[in-house]
Image: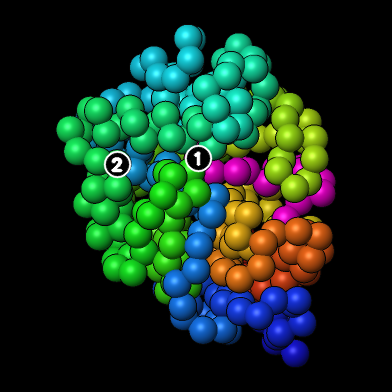
């Protein structure tokens, strides 16, 4: 059975999964229908913020969010904001508190600088340039994107071979504020709970939604809607998936198995390895 053959065993009605290398799709299964991305939306939002930084509309270290917080803190879930409201639960840079509200605050900040809606900024500076023609932000910048697998694949390829903000991606995909403890949704307390600027960093997390063979440099995001995207720069490979079943124990068990199978079948050595 090929790596993606395991998708047929998942307890879902609809699943679409693809393995992606630097040239595009190497294997895929499932229908190309639009489904909710849930928190994978945060990757689009983070890219929109980084484009605004690259355009000189704001800087990573200027104040934003609660007192003492910056754009960088908000992107890295280190601002101290509560998950879903404006309550401040910690001083900035002390704990990793996964905050949907933090991403909404980021969107408000960017929109105020650009003078247009955040959805328009995302469309003009991320979705349209990357050819994500069937994906739209229909709700919160933390969780409101909806689109098909082909658009999630295009996002994965962009993260493998950055074109939008190539000079910022190395910084965005390494740990910001190293050592912070926190809760990884669905997997419990992680110490440290490493995060980049919008991108969750695998590092040594156990348990985790990627595979045991994913490198420590793997980054990405998953969503409550049963959606995920990871990028492993050492393997020069990405994997994207959409389903119609909410994340739960089934996904926590199934996704690492899929990830290891994809790596076993399709991974290529990095340039550093020859």
Q: Which residue is mark 2?
A: 118
Measured as percent of width and height from the top left, residue 135 is found at 36, 64
Q: CA distance from mark 1 to mark 2?
A: 16 Å
User: Is 153 above or below relative to 166?
Assistant: below
Q: How many marks?
A: 2
Q: Quadrant of residue 11?
A: bottom right
User: Is 44 above or below relative to 152?
Assistant: above
Measured as percent of width and height from the top left, residue 36 is found at 50, 62
Q: Is residue 224 visible?
A: yes
Say whether residue 63 is left or right of residue 261: left
Magenta run includes residue 205: yes
Magenta span main SS: loop
- How many other residues sit within 10 Å of disc 2, few (<14), some (14-19) or many (≥20)? many
Q: Quadrant of the C terminus?
A: bottom right
Q: Quadrant of residue 264?
A: bottom right
Q: Which residues are magenta?
A: 197-209
Q: Is residue 154 visible?
A: no
The residue at 75%/90% (across/down) is 1
The residue at 69%/76% (across/down) is 12
Q: Name the mark nearer the viewer: 1 or 2.
A: 2
Say whether residue 126 is left or right of residue 91: left
Name the one closer to the observer, 238 or 99.
99
Measured as percent of width and height from the top left, residue 236 is found at 55, 63
User: Is 167 above or below relative to 11?
Assistant: above
Say whether residue 259 is left or right of residue 133: right
Q: Residue furthest left?
A: 115
């Amino acid at each position: 059975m090929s790596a993606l053959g395991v998708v047929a065993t998942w307890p879902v009605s609809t699943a679409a999964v693809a393995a992606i290398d630097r040239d595009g799709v190497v294997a895929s299964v499932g229908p190309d229908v639009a489904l909710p991305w849930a928190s994978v939306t945060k990757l689009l939002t983070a890219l929109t913020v980084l484009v605004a930084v690259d355009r000189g509309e704001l800087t990573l270290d200027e104040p934003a969010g609660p007192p003492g917080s910056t754009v960088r803190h908000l992107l890295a879930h280190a601002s101290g904001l509560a998950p879903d409201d404006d309550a401040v639960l910690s001083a900035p840079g002390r704990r990793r508190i996964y905050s949907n509200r933090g991403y909404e605050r980021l969107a408000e900040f960017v929109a105020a600088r650009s003078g247009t809606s955040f959805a328009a900024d995302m469309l003009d500076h991320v979705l349209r340039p990357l050819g994500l023609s069937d994906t739209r932000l229909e709700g919160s910048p933390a969780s409101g994107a909806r689109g098909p697998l082909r658009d999630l694949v295009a996002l994965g390829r962009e993260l493998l071979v950055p074109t939008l903000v190539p000079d910022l991606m190395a910084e965005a995909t390494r740990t910001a504020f190293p050592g912070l403890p926190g809760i990884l949704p669905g997997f419990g307390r992680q110490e440290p709970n490493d995060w980049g600027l919008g991108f969750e960093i695998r590092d040594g997390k156990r348990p985790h939604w990627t595979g045991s063979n994913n490198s420590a440099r793997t980054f990405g995001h998953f969503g409550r809607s049963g959606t995920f995207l990871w990028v492993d720069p050492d393997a020069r490979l990405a994997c994207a998936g959409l389903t119609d079943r909410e994340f739960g124990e089934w996904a926590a068990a199934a996704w690492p198995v899929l990830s290891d199978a994809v790596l076993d079948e399709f991974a290529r050595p990095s340039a550093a390895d020859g």
